[in-house]
């Protein structure tokens, strides 16, 4: 993906997003997004989910040295190699299912959600918390940045259409026929959320834990950022999984 189509912005202090077009199966406009957080140490944590094009690399280098690279689920692994090549000293983490898909690339990972013991610390927990959802079919990892009250995730929650991610193209970012009906408030997305939970009990446990975090914003990999009332959106989508 070219730099010209990438929208780079500081969503809130020290939290930057890199949004660009991405089509599932080359047809469905899902959009893609990486997120970077500048830590108090000056180092940078990045959820790497989009190409490391020139514009993205320039901004990351301006923010500071990249110390952590994370893959957020079993399918968001396509560009991890690009990031690791450019930032070889950075520590890299991903779910075990994603790591297995990268064996042919010979990438070295410093941690594996789903394989490491529960409660394993990776070095950034003083500023970014994480929760591994083993009960989701994509083996999601959700991140929480308390300083900005921001939840960062990959495929757990979608907020379509992907307007920002397609804003530098001629496309509206709307999914054909479905339009904007894949968002936290839609019955369709609620059905998808239920269907992608392969272990309902585990999902209830983890969604209830995530609900305890004090977030107001959600940055998804697909669709627009939910700037306000992110907790309301999360509770609406996962009401069937929340334990009273």
Image: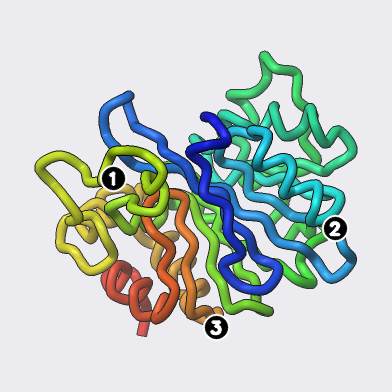
Q: Residue at x 60, y 72 (%)?
A: 12
| Quadrant (top left/top right/bottom left/bottom right) for the C terminus | bottom left
Q: Earlier in the sequence, mark 1 or mark 2?
A: 2
- Which structural element holds mark 2? loop
Point out residue 24 in the picture as x, y percentages from the top left corner: 34, 31
Q: Residue at x 49, y 62 (%)?
A: 219
Please identify the residue farthest to the top as the structure is shown.
Answer: 104
Instruction: Choose top left, top right, bottom left or bottom right for residue 57.
Output: top right
Q: Residue at x 84, y 54 (%)?
A: 64
Mark seen at residue 43: 2
- Which structural element holds mark 1? loop
Viewed as shown, does residue 32 lie left or right of 120?
A: left
Mark seen at residue 214: 3
Mark seen at residue 193: none
Instruction: Choose top left, top right, bottom left or bottom right for residue 226.
Output: bottom left
Q: CA distance from mark 1 to mark 2?
A: 33 Å
Q: Nearer the viewer, mark 1 or mark 2?
A: 1
Q: CA distance from mark 3 to mark 2?
A: 24 Å
Task: Give the residue at mark 1.
Answer: 173
- The number of discs equals 3
């Amino acid at each position: 993906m070219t730099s010209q189509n990438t929208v780079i912005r500081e969503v809130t202090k020290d939290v930057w997003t890199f949004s660009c077009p991405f089509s599932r199966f080359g047809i469905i406009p899902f959009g893609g997004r990486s997120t970077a957080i500048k830590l108090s140490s000056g180092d940078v944590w990045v959820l790497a989910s989009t190409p490391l094009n020139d514009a993205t690399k320039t901004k990351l280098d301006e923010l500071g040295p990249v110390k952590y690279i994370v893959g957020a689920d079993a399918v968001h692994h396509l560009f991890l190699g690009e990031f690791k090549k450019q930032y070889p000293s950075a520590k890299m983490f991903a779910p075990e299912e994603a790591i297995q898909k990268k064996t042919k690339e010979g990438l070295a990972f410093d941690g594996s959600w789903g394989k490491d013991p529960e409660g394993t610390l990776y070095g950034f927990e003083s500023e970014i918390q994480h929760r591994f959802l083993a009960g989701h079919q994509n083996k999601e990892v959700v991140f929480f940045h308390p300083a900005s009250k921001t939840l960062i995730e990959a495929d757990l929650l979608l907020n379509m259409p992907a307007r920002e991610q397609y804003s530098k193209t001629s496309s509206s970012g709307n999914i054909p026929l479905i339009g904007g009906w894949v968002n936290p408030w839609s019955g369709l997305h609620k059905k998808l959320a239920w269907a992608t939970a392969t272990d309902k009990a585990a999902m209830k446990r983890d969604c209830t834990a995530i609900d305890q975090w004090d977030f107001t914003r959600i940055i998804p990999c697909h669709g627009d950022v939910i700037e306000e009332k992110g907790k309301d959106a999360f509770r609406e989508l996962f009401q069937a999984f929340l334990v009273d």
